[in-house]
Image (cartoon, rainbow, N blue to C red):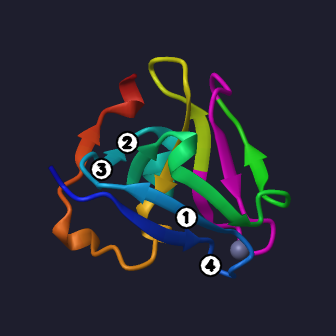
Amino acid sequence: MAEMKTYTGGCHCGQVRYEATTDLAQVVTCNCSICHKLGSVLTFVPPEQFKSLSGADVVKSYQFNKKVINHLHCPTCGVESYATGKGPDGKPMYAVNLRCVDGVDLSTLKPFAYNGRDA
Ligand SMILES: [Zn+2]
C-alpha cells in the first residue's frame, strides 16, 4: 500500500490554502460537464484528512445538476482547488484537485477515468 502523506495545496493566488493527507491510491479523472471543462484530477479524502489553512470563509460555491457537490472556487483567481460533498456512503468527503496540490507529479499517476457524464 502506498504511503500516507500530507500535501499542501490551494488556488492560484494563494488565498485558498489547505492540507490533505492521502496515499494517492485512488486518483480519478471524470468526464462530467464540469470536470471536463476544469480538467480536474481528483482524489477523495474524508474530513479528518483535510484541513483548511485559509480561504474557507471566502470561497464561492457553485452547484448544478443535483446540487450535491459544492464546487468551491476562489473569488479572486477563480481556481477550484477543492470541492465538498458526500461519498456514496453518505458521509462527507472532500474532493481535492491534484492539479492544485504542491509537489504532485501528475505524470507518475494513473488516474481512473470515471464516466461521470453518464452517471
Ligand atoms: Zn485564488
SS state under label 3 = loop
* Residue 61: image location, x then y, percent: 76, 46
Residue 118 is left or right of residue 8, and the answer is left
Mark 1 residue element: strand
Q: Residue furthest right?
A: 57
Pick whichever, 92 or 99, lies toward us.
92
59 and 47: which is toward the camera? 47
Q: Which residue is mark 2?
A: 31
What is the CA distance from the residue labelled 2 to the residue labelled 1?
26 Å
Residue 19 got which mark? Answer: 1
Place residue 14 in its image quadrant.
bottom right
Q: Residues within 10 Å of mark 2 (few under 14, many from 20)?
A: some
Which amino acid type corresponds to the residue marked 2 in the rendered image? Asn
Q: Give the spatial CA distance, label 4 vs label 3.
A: 21 Å
Within-10-Å neighbours for mark 4: few <14, some 14–19, many 20+? some
Q: Answer with mark 1 or mark 4, whichever residue precedes in sequence.
A: 4
Give the amino acid at mark 4.
His
Tell me which label, 4 or 3, sits earlier in the chain. Answer: 4
Residue at figure coordinates x 73%, y 44% from the top left:
62
- The amino acid on which the numbered mark 1 sits, given as a three-letter code, is Glu
Q: Residues within 10 Å of mark 1 (few under 14, many from 20)?
A: some
The numbered dot on residue 114 is: none
Q: In the image, residue 46 lies at what x, y percent?
A: 50, 39
Numbered disc in front, either 3 or 2:
3
> Disc number at residue 27?
3
Q: What distance separates the C-alpha of mark 2 from that of mark 4?
A: 23 Å
Specify whether 1 is left or right of 29: left
Write down the residue under mark 4.
Answer: 12
Q: Quadrant of the C terminus?
A: top left
Reply yes or no: does residue 80 show up in magenta. Answer: yes
Q: Is residue 31 above or below residue 64?
A: below
Residue 15 visible in this rendered orientation of the protein: yes
